[in-house]
């Protein structure tokens, strides 16, 4: 072996040292590449969590959760009808909160993934020369972070705009109108929504770019350590460079966020400052005799629901995520009736209460109610006839084919003119003798005879006349535009579903057919082979459910499949053909199993 080899000097030693340095650099690079992706993912997830929190608080959008609700509405529209129906049927009241928080989790996960990809893509070997290494490395790191920001911002902002701008501006207008702002300026509303989206996208871009800057500073330190034998610099120099870079970027990030926030608040939308009872439905002599004959049966059947549902037990359904229903103030709320350009009409709640009022019992059922479901209730309501409000506004133009209702939560609905002007279509402000509760639409909701709940919008702020077939919120998602109530009947007793042979079993429940009324209810104790008539209480009004009951004595032990069906006011039998709630409301007969022992 030569002396050069033994002494470890000469070109062989230099070549080995270079290979060692390159190997060390490549190892550091591989580790830093993984670290860059991980840091980007962490930054993206952090930005997602912070942005979601700001969305839920309504930061930069006047306290209204505009972006969160807009994302939710877009999610509802993107879900296939079959999936939506499955979630409603299987998960019931859990469907909406689980879907909402799942959507927000998906937003965070998507931002984490985008941050990871940007973190990996930002990798670049820093140019560290014999002199000016720190300065050149810092400049390259800042340029890399700036490029990352310029890529990350539009990659986040543009999809957010595409997904949320239209539903967001519609929701924002509704909330402002609910606070008494008449005809909110479209440019101001658009600026508010776009500004909020820019803040959320900017937050993501800044955090990801900051993570890239941090990774670059780390690489500078690693490179300085790897080349210490042949280059100037030290670990202390690398640490100082990293601190300087991160410090400068933090100042830039804070300045950008503060400046954007200040701009948001500067474009805040302007805001405005903040009867005799009708008689109860008369009963005919035949109804009175039937009612008297049924009293003995109803006295023997325990557990039937009250004919009038207390406000606290009345079913609640809305399009909004849990906890996001609007809460409006009566002194600031206004109803804008925009039927004719030359006859604008704006009414306060007191103006409506000063008009002749109508008090009426009325049953509401959700179109997503299953056979045997609980999304049906009955109450007494007070309000004014919609046609009286239309007349006060100067009547409808000849070209009008529908009335459109806009609500404080961005919900929209429409009615054909004939249904809107029906004498029993009401704008109601009272429920069971109390002001309309917030969750049921305070201060004003619509009440339409014979239609599912989706056609009875809550938190109404504006009524318009249109000359085209306007489709409301749920109709655009595939639900029925007619939404006529299906004939339904269900069991509410017995409970539990057990009995003894030879003993009487009380059966009972409710039946409903909207404006068609109920003529009869029949029960089959043998799964449809024979049918027995049940006693039916007279309805409280023409648009209410009825209670029904019968006493059944099982002949022997075993499991009995018991069915119920109803006939509407025209004698048409409730269909036995089962169908899901989507799109026209559920159909089929309610079946229970009663175990009869010895």
Image (cartoon, rainbow, N blue to C red):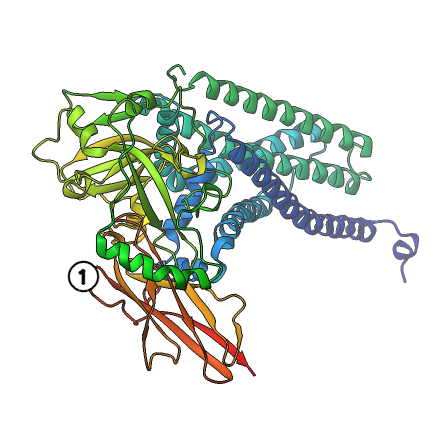
Q: What quarter of the picture does the N terminus occupy? A: bottom right
> Where is residue 121 drawn, in percent x and y?
56, 46
> Where is residue 99 drawn, in percent x and y?
49, 52
Q: Is residue 398 above or below residue 483?
A: above
Q: What quarter of the picture does the C terminus occupy? A: bottom right
Q: Is residue 275 above or below residue 424?
A: above
Q: How many marks?
A: 1
- Nearer to the camera, 201 or 583: 583
- Nearer to the camera, 182 or 211: 182
* Callout 1: SS: loop
Residue 416: quadrant of the picture: top left
> Where is residue 302 drawn, in percent x and y?
48, 61
Q: Residue at x 63, y 27 (%)?
A: 249
Q: Residue at x 79, y 40 (%)?
A: 225
Please indicate whether residue 486 sits to the left or right of residue 5 in the image.
left
Q: Residues within 10 Å of mark 1 (few under 14, many from 20)?
A: few
Please indicate whether residue 405 sits to the left or right of residue 82 in the image.
left
Q: Residue at x 27, y 30 (%)?
A: 357
Residue 439: quadrant of the picture: top left
Residue 413: quadrant of the picture: top left
Q: Residue at x 44, y 54 (%)?
A: 305
Residue 182 seen from this side: yes
> Where is residue 288 drawn, in percent x and y?
27, 54
Q: Residue furthest left?
A: 398
Residue 485 seen from this side: no
The residue beneath circle 1 is 570
Q: Is residue 480 above or below residue 255?
A: below
- Nearer to the camera, 206 or 3: 206
């Amino acid at each position: 072996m030569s002396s050069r080899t033994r002494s470890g000097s000469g070109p062989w030693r230099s070549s080995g040292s270079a290979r060692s340095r390159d190997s060390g650099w490549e190892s550091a690079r591989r580790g830093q590449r993984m670290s860059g992706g991980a840091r980007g993912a962490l930054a993206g997830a952090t930005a997602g969590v912070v942005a979601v929190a700001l969305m839920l608080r309504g930061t930069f959008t006047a306290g209204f959760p505009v972006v969160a609700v807009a994302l939710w509405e877009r999610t509802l529209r993107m879900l296939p009808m079959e999936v939506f129906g499955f979630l409603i049927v299987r998960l019931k009241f859990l469907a909406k909160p689980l879907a909402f928080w799942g959507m927000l989790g998906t937003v965070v996960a998507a931002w984490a993934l985008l941050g990871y990809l940007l973190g990996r893509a930002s990798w670049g070997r820093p140019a560290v020369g014999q002199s000016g290494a720190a300065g050149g490395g810092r400049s390259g790191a800042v340029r890399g972070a700036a490029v990352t920001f310029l890529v990350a911002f539009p990659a986040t902002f543009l999809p957010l705009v595409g997904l949320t701008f239209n539903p967001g501006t519609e929701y924002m207008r509704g909330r402002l109108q609910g606070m008494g702002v008449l005809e909110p300026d479209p440019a101001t509303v658009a600026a508010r929504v776009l500004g909020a989206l820019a803040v959320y996208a900017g937050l993501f871009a800044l955090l990801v770019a900051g993570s890239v800057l941090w990774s670059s500073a780390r690489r500078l330190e690693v490179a300085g350590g790897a080349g210490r034998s042949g280059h100037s610099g030290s670990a202390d120099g690398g640490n100082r460079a990293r601190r300087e870079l991160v410090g400068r970027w933090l100042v830039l990030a804070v300045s950008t966020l503060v400046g954007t926030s200040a701009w948001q608040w500067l474009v805040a939308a302007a805001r405005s400052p903040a009867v005799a009872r009708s008689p109860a439905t008369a009963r005919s002599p035949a109804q009175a005799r039937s009612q008297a004959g049924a009293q003995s049966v109803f006295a023997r059947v325990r557990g039937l629901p009250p004919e009038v549902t207390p406000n606290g037990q009345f079913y609640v359904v809305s399009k909004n995520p849990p906890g996001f229903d609007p809460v409006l103030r009566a002194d600031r709320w206004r109803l804008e009736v925009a039927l004719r350009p030359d006859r604008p009409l704006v009414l306060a709640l007191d103006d409506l209460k000063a008009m002749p009022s109508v008090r009426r019992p009325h049953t509401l059922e959700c179109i997503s109610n299953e056979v045997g479901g609980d999304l049906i209730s009955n109450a007494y309501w007070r309000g004014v006839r919609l046609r009286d409000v239309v007349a006060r506004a100067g009547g409808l133009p000849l070209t009008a084919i529908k009335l459109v209702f806009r609500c404080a939560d961005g919900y929209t609905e429409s009615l054909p003119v004939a249904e809107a002007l029906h004498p029993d279509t009401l704008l109601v402000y009272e429920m069971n003798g109390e002001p309309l509760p917030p969750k049921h639409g305070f201060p004003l909701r619509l009440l339409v005879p014979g239609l599912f709940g989706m056609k009875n919008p809550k938190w109404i702020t504006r009524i318009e006349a249109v000359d085209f077939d306007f489709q409301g919120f749920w109709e655009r998602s595939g639900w029925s535009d007619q939404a006529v109530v299906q004939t339904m009947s269900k069991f509410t007793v017995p409970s539990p579903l057990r009995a003894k042979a030879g003993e009487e079993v009380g059966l009972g429940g409710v039946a409903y057919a909207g404006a068609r009324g109920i003529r009869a209810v029949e029960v089959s104790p043998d799964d449809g082979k024979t049918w027995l008539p049940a006693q039916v209480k007279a309805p409280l009004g023409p648009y209410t459910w009825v209670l029904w009951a019968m006493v059944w004595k099982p002949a022997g032990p075993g499991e009995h499949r018991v069915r119920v069906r109803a006939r509407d006011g025209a004698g048409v039998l409730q269909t036995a053909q089962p169908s899901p709630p989507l799109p026209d409301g559920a159909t089929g007969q309610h079946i229970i199993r009663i175990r009869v022992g010895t």
